[in-house]
Image (cartoon, helix red, strand yellow):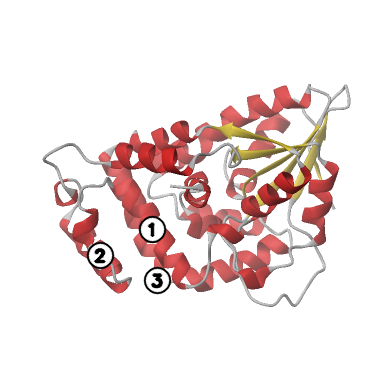
Amino acid sequence: MGAKTATRLSAPLLVCLAAVTGPWTSAAADPAAWRLQGKNGGEVTLLGSVHVLRAADYPLPPSVDALFERAQILVMELDLDDVDAVAQQRIILDTALLPQGTDLRDVIDADVYLSLEQSTAGAGIDLALLERFEPWFLAITVLDLGLRKFGFQGEHGIEQYVLREAQRTRKEIVGLETLEFQIGIFDALSPSLQQAMLEQTLAELEGAEAEMTAMADAWREGELEELADELLDEFDEFPGLYATLITERNDAWVETLERKLRDGRRHLVVVGALHLVGRDNVVEGLTARGHEVARIH
C-alpha cells in the first residue's frame, strides 16, 4: 500500500471528507484555514484537506499555494515522504488478514455480506479474492474502487499536491502519526465497529458523486462549518467509531501542535476537514487550552 493508500488511511470515511466537482463558477472565498501564533515566533496554520480530487479540479485556489509558501515545515497526518511502498503493502496486508480458519462470512452479518458482494461484483471484482481480510480493509478497498469509478483519486488530493511541492522545494515534512499507528486504529476496532464502518461505506457509495460535489463547493468556498452537522449525523448511529477515528486523534494532535508552536518555526498543518470543524475538533481543542486561533480570510 503506497502513498496513495496511506492517504486513504488518513481519512477512513472519505465520502464524508472528500470533495470534488467540475468547473468552478465562484471564487469569492478560499478553503477554510486557521492560524495561531507562539510567543517566540512559532506559528501553526491549519488547512482542512480534501483527500481525493480529479485532475480536472486543478488548479487549486491560490490560497493553498500561499499558505504552503509561507510555511517552513509541512505537517501531515502521515509523513508520506517517509514511506516504503513495499514495506507498507506487507505491513498492511499482514495486519488486515483474518485469523487462520476464519473468513469474512464469519465476522459480518449476512445482509452486509450480500451488499458487499453486489458492490464488488459491480466493480468487476470477485469477492472470494478478499474473503480473508478484515471488514475495515474491505471498507477502504471498496471505497477506493467506488471513488475511482467517478475519477476521484488520492493522487490528486490536497495531501499529494502539497507533498509534491514540499519535495520540489526540499521543505521539511513531518507526520502527526505513523503508518503502524493508523493501521492499528482500524485493526483494534471491535467487530461491530468494523462492520459499522463497512456498512456506512457501502451505504454512502450510491450517492457519493453528488454528495462529494456539494462538499467540494463548500470546501472551496470555506464553508466547512455548514457541512459539520450533516457529516456528524452520519456518525450518530456509530458513536464509538467517531470517538476512535476522530476525537481521540484530535486530542493527541492538539498536544503535538502545542509543542510545534513553541519551536519558533512556521508550520502548515494539512489534515482532513472534519478534524477542524466537527465535534471535538482541533480548533476548539487548541482554543480550550488558551490559544488564540484566528480564521484566515
Residue 289 in sight here: no
Q: Amino acid at mark 2?
A: Ser
Residue occupying the point 58% across, 38% down = 280
Q: Is residue 237 found left or right of 266 in the rendered image?
A: left
Pick the residue in front: 122 or 219: 122
Q: Quick one: label 2, few (<14), some, or many (20+) residues within 10 Å?
A: some
Residue 4 in sight here: yes
**Residues tagged 3 and 1 counted as in contact (Cβ below 8 A):** no
Dot 2 corresponds to which residue?
115
What x and y, as percent, mark residue 161?
67, 54
Query: Is tag 3's residue or tag 1's residue first in the polypeptide sequence?
Result: 1
**Residues tagged 1 and 2 counted as in contact (Cβ below 8 A):** no
Q: Is residue 149 above or below residue 200?
A: below
What x and y, as percent, mark residue 276?
64, 44
Residue occupying the point 29% across, 71% down = 124
For residue 28, what is the image quadrant? bottom right
Marks 3/2: CA–CA distance: 12 Å
Query: Is tag 3's residue or tag 2's residue first in the polypeptide sequence?
Result: 2
Q: Amino acid at mark 3?
A: Glu
Dot 3 corresponds to which residue?
206
Marks 1/2: CA–CA distance: 11 Å
What x and y, as percent, mark residue 177?
55, 32
Q: Which mark is residue 201?
A: 1
Residue at disc 2, secondary structure? helix
Numbered disc total: 3
